[in-house]
Image (cartoon, grey):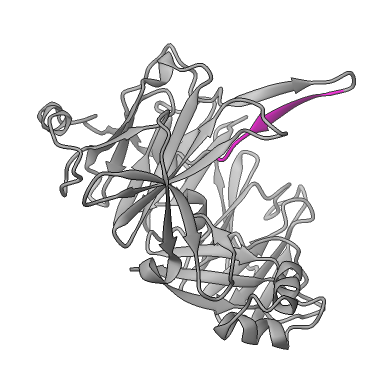
Amino acid sequence: MEKCFVTICILYLFLGGCTSNKGKENSLIYFNVSASYPEKEVNLEDIATIEYLQLKVDEEFLFSIAPNIITENKIIFGHRLNGDILVFSRNGEPLSIFNHKGNGPGEYIIIHRLMYDEVLDEIFVVSANKIMVYSSYGEFYRSIPLLEQLSLGEIVNYDSQTFLMYDYLKKYPAPFSLISKEDGSVVETIDLPVNKNINSNNIYVIIQSENSISLVRGPAHRIVKYNDGYLLTDFSTDTLYFLSSEKKLSPILTRTPAIQSMDPVVYLNGFVEAGNYEFVSTVTVKYVDSNLPVTYLLRDKETGSVYRQKITFNGYKGKNVTISPETIASTQDSRLGFINLDLTELQDANHENKLSGRLKELVDKSDEDGNDIYMLLHFK
């Protein structure tokens, strides 16, 4: 029988509202998305151990995209349109490649999303109104049905029995649900308080020209891995919630000003914790220079002070990177981040003597048309 979570503990929310902004453990975090913040430089090596990785060039394992999945033992790519799925070991060795694109049994029409259960060695291909399940060598296991015309905004591998999903079109009983890995049925729903006067999906700008109409979106992360559970947010509400592995739901952050009071709207994604900081991104729903502006911020957990990110690292002089939910999207591990470094850019930087250490060694050994280099960030 489908279960429903108790939405929230009122006493906890009340106490959280009275906490200081000093960032004490278990306190409710306050975050002003409209304030102007000074810049703070943080050295990446102070908050993470950097592992550099470059996949070997193999004529049968060609790819031009960043990996969809990085686990303890695997790196997996899925080409959305042509249907190829490529599997590498974590040390960069090619393991398998398969393609089951089609309309027949055991096939997928398109790769919308990929997930991987390393314990069971199951690759999940989200396609249209079903999830196809294969081994990492392409053996078909089963098909998991989903509701017709479902638009899965986000879906993650929650535990051995269920997926955690966000439903854009609200076809399920609640936007956030746990669904069965066996038959796609709703196991439990997660009811977050929402503002029904705001459509949480209207976080885009419509651009119309003489010949076309296009939607411009910014990065949106409603499900973000955090500790042993996930941060959940519905952009119609001002509170970010934490769903623990024990399925306990509690408030963890509240943003100001209220989203319904803003024009243009600024929404806030979940955060990534590393060292003494929480790294977060905000997006302004306003068309500027062909994009929606993204601001990358960090919060000092001890003082509660917020700054604009300036993250540098020793291996590449003058290079800045950012940390946000996108950094852990492919790992689904709150302690492991991923950043792709373009090889052509690195080769140019190497000629200008900007590289050092392990990164320089890899670039020196790379062919001109070699693969990009990955930074795996083991957060402290």
Q: How many marks?
A: 0
First to last magenta residue range: 212-219
Residue 219 shows up from this direction: yes
Given residues 176 and 67, the one toward you in this image is 67
Q: Position of residue 299 (x, y in %)?
A: 33, 47
Q: For the C terminus, which image quadrant? A: bottom left
Q: Where is residue 119 in the image (x, y as percent from the top left)?
A: 42, 70
Measuring 61% from the left and 26% from the top, which residue is drawn there?
Answer: 204
Measuring 15% from the left and 47% from the top, which residue is drawn there?
Answer: 24
Q: Position of residue 360 (x, y in %)?
A: 63, 83
Q: For the N terminus, which image quadrant? A: top left
* Magenta: main secondary structure: strand
Look at the picture and state if 204 lies above or below 368: above
Quadrant in the rendering for residue 346: bottom right
Look at the picture and state if 232 lies above or below 11: below
Say left or right for 334 vs 79. Answer: left
Look at the picture and state if 85 lies above or below 57: above
Say left or right for 294 vs 119. Answer: right
Quadrant in the rendering for residue 374: bottom right
Q: Does 19 lie within the magenta span?
A: no
Measuring 41% from the left and 43% from the top, which residue is drawn there?
Answer: 38
